[in-house]
Image (tube, rainbow, N blue to C red):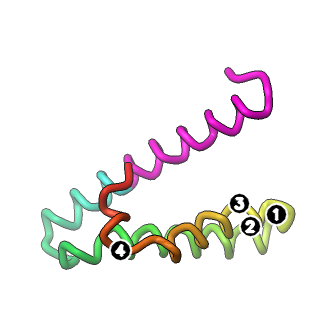
Amino acid sequence: LPTDDSEVRDWALEWRDRAQGRLLDSYLAALTTEGLVPEDARDRELLLDKALYEVRYELGHRPDWLPLPLRSLRRLLRSPAATLSAMP
């Protein structure tokens, strides 16, 4: 495991990206099989829904952690929809 702050941050960002990618892959595979969501809306809708859930959760349970999901939400809202599907 990483030992200094920059290594911890890099490790955490890498973990976040991998976890997010796996969540999307599994979720979208299930939705695609059923034909439930239009192709172009899938990634962005799921990521925004997840980010909003995390904001609500941290607000109610760990307010000190609220900046973490807010950063993700800001990043998603600033990203064009086309770039989100290329994210891991």
Residue that mark 1 sits on: 62
Q: CA distance from mark 3 to mark 1?
A: 11 Å
Residue 1 x, y percent position in the rendering: 67, 21
Residue 84 magenta-highlighted: no
Q: In the image, is residue 51 above or below residue 4?
A: below
Residue that mark 4 sits on: 81
As shown in the figure, which amino acid type bears the numbered disc 2?
Answer: Glu
Q: Are marks 4 and 1 in contact (CB under 8 Å)?
A: no
Badge 3, how many Cα within 10 Å: few under 14, some, many 20+? few
* Residue 18 shown left or right of residue 33 in the figure: right
User: Any mark on residue 58, and which?
Assistant: 2
Q: Nearer the viewer, mark 2 or mark 4?
A: 4
* Residue 5 shown left or right of residue 13 in the figure: right
User: Any mark on residue 30, and which?
Assistant: none
Q: Are marks 3 and 2 in contact (CB under 8 Å)?
A: yes
Residue 78 x, y percent position in the rendering: 52, 74
Residue that mark 3 sits on: 68
Q: Earlier in the sequence, mark 3 or mark 1?
A: 1
Per the rendered image, the range of residues in magenta is: 1-23
Q: Quadrant of residue 29?
A: bottom left
